[in-house]
Amino acid sequence: MNITGMNLAIVRTLENRIKALADRIQNLEDCAPCTVKQEEEQVASSSSSTATENKKSKKRWEHQQQKQPLIEENEEYHTTTLHHHLQVIEQQLGKGAKGYNNSMMMMSPKSKRSCLQRVQETIGRLQKLESEMRAADAKQAEKARMHDLADSFLAYIHSIPPPGREPYITLGFVASQITPWIHRLPLTYFETTVRFLQSNTGASYWTRDDARAFITNVTAVLEKDRGEIDMDF
């Protein structure tokens, strides 16, 4: 299983565990209520803990941003870091689950409903995260496919016979092996290359200079499109 698949599996595991906690909260709705004072203290304590944790998370994030390069510039770092964060979330969730065994019996129905709402919001965030990860995985697969296509076309370019003394051989190879790539390269990602082929193939006669120029220029436009593919993704 690759890193992205592992991350998606962790997200689904967290989602299932949180749903289990939500069911526990729902089942304990009719347990003995605590006093209003206890409820207020618990809600205040929960809010304080959440605020403290948010501040700590913000400080850790700011500290990490100062030390690490931009995540967009290093896909491997991004994937590894996300995997680590999800592991930390799972560990924290496990600790929180143990705390529910004692605290839930002391909570009033109102507090339980509030807690259930927060759990449901967490499930929603995890589902959104899983969707984003799937979309990112699909984009990376598309990017890899386009690079493979560019590599295949470049191999054909490298196999073009050198002009030598018989440039018509080069012209014939281009007509039979290179021109059809007009219909194989997606215009979305290879527009410059496709437009070049449309304008520079189909001639009935080439000089040696024409043949050399074609090989140089078609290689250049292909690499230009390849660079823009990296920028698009």
Image (tube, helix red, strand yellow):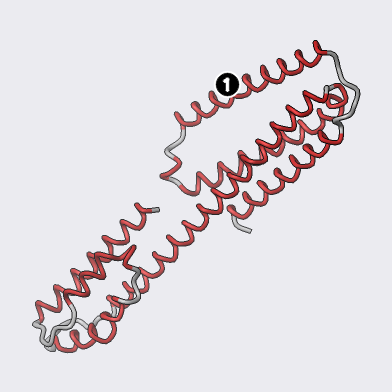
Residue 22 is situated, as x and y percent measured from the top left of the image, at 77, 37
Q: Nearer the viewer, residue 76 or 107?
A: 107
Residue at coordinates 11% horizontally, 77% vertically from top-left?
A: 210
Q: Which residue is mark 1?
A: 55
Residue at coordinates 36% horizontally, 55% vertically from top-left?
A: 230
Q: Determine whether, in the image, residue 84 is placed left or right of residue 220.
A: right
Tell me if residue 140 comes above or below residue 39 in the rendering.
below
Q: Count the marks: how many?
A: 1
Q: Nearer the viewer, residue 165 or 126?
A: 126
Q: Nearer the viewer, residue 225 or 78?
A: 225
Q: Determine whether, in the image, residue 167 is placed left or right of residue 105.
A: left
Residue 209 placement: quadrant? bottom left
Q: Nearer the viewer, residue 216 or 186?
A: 186
Residue at coordinates 16% horizontally, 76% vertically from top-left?
A: 200
In what element is the residue under mark 1? Answer: helix
Residue 18 placement: quadrant? top right
Residue 25 is situated, as x and y percent measured from the top left of the image, at 81, 33
Residue 127 is situated, as x and y percent measured from the top left of the image, at 63, 45
Residue 45 placement: quadrant? top right
Residue at coordinates 76% horizontally, 36% vertically from top-left?
A: 94
Residue type pointed to by label 1: Lys
Tell me if residue 168 comes above or below residue 159 in the rendering.
below
Mark 1 nearby-residue class (10 Å; few <14, some 14–19, many ≥20)? few
Tell me if residue 161 comes above or below residue 32 in the rendering.
below
